[in-house]
Amino acid sequence: MSYDHQPERAFGFHTRAVHAGARPEPGTGARAFPIYQTSSYVFEDPESAAAYFNLQEYGNTYSRIMNPTVASLEERLANLEGGIGAVAFASGLAAQSSALFTMLVPGDHIVASAALYGGTVTQLKHLARKLSVGLTFVDPDATANWRDAVREETRLLFAETIGNPGGNILDIEAVAAVAHDAGVPLMVDNTFATPYLCRPMEWGADIVVHSLTKFLGGHGTSIGGAVVDSGEFDWSNGKFSVVADPSPAYHGLAFHETFGNYGYLMKLRAETLRDLGGALGPQNAFLFMQGIETLPLRMERHVGNALAIGQWLSAREDVEAVRHPGLPGSPYAGLVARYLPKGAGAVFCFDLDGGREAGQEFIRGVQLFSHLANVGDAKSLIIHPASTTHRQLGDDELAAAGIGPGTIRLSIGIEDVEDLIWDLEGGFARIGREVA
């Protein structure tokens, strides 16, 4: 944003969360960005239509590929993450699978953190198998593990800023160095941190993915995802023929040569989104835009409440462990101070005495916490991962993800923290009656 009578200004995060990508609608003066609820667009003439479909000019063709409301959201996300652009999708997993599909070919190899959301682990395993792509999971906490897992055919390193649900904090700069030494990108899922708490591209990440469903939306109303590109990775380094070479799916167009830093994003949109069809609808894009406007305000409350509850749980004798990376004594304290100085997120786990039975009884005893498979809502949420979100994982995979039979995952909302503690007391009381 700039004005003719003022010099260019670097606006702060709060301001950009409200204004980036959204301008008053010129025809009506509407201040809220409109919902363009349309499937398609009228072309000016046959020549412009041909130019759009040839990617010689940029314009709206069909809402599976682009939509003005969705484009506004994409611009805001790229602005907040510090990327050159973004492509939005119908879900976080659609965003991830599309990001992978755009860069990989059979015979390639991925190195991924073992401390990932269960749905991501399952997606990576089955997508890799179906695409004949190799896959190695590593303990993300030691940089040497990443370096040792890289092969000649490795084409991607993938991790989460804050691991789900174990709270592992990624040493982004160190892992990015491993990726770049191997000539491959680092892709980071920044869902739990959001760009308010951490911007992985500032530390060397090349691609950031989000589940917009979580903190960015913030109200549990919509499903969506996004891929943000830093524009810094060289896709013509000889390892990514699918991005650099002429594409048979687009009349021989070489995306990286033609579009330069935007080559990967253009292929992601013009080919992958076009062909796989995981398009985000404009109504959901509008709701995400509304949510992002209050993101920094909500995140301050989320992380403050979460730290207070983590400290309270740590003082209880009936809690085996609390895995909140922001607590004193956490093995991730140094990484939190470096990458997450505003707070270590609002999703964390604790382990109960009594195992699976205690975990399930605890959930029966709470009232304010909603028992559901989501995080990042303004409302506080609770779940027992071993029997729900990570149920598809084996015992070894559960252990690698930091999940035990009595693990409870909390997503702390913006309610009064005293009320949340009162509610958790009800869970402990339930265990005392039913399990002891």
Image (tube, rainbow, N blue to C red):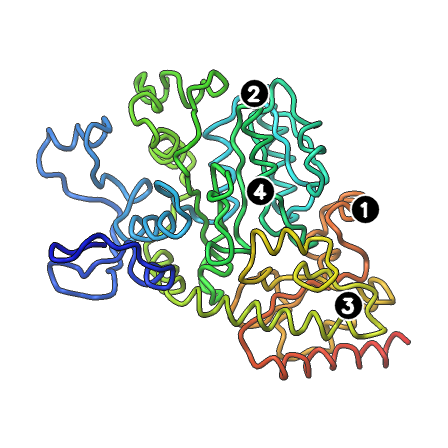
CA neighbours of label 3 inside 10 A, class few (<14), some (14 to 19), many (20+): some
Asked which secondary structure carries label 3, the reply is helix
In the rendered image, the residue lying farthest to the right is 436
Q: Between tags 2 and 4, which lies in front?
A: 4
For image coordinates 39% across by 46% down, the residue present is 82
Q: Name the residue under label 4.
A: 172
Q: Quadrant of the N terminus?
A: bottom left
326 with respect to 85 (left or right) = right
Q: What residue type is labelled 3?
A: Gln
Q: Mark 1 points at which residue?
A: 395
The total number of labels drawn is 4
First in sequence, mark 1 or 4: give its number. 4
Q: Mark 2 points at which residue?
A: 106
Q: What residue type is labelled 4?
A: Ile
Asked which secondary structure carries label 1, the reply is helix
Q: Name the residue under label 3.
A: 360
For image coordinates 44% across by 43% down, the residue present is 227
First in sequence, mark 3 or 1: give its number. 3
**Distance CA(mark 3)–CA(mark 1):** 18 Å
> Quadrant location of residue 325?
bottom right
Residue 88 vs residue 233, the one in the foreground: 233
Residue 43 vs residue 88, the one in the foreground: 88
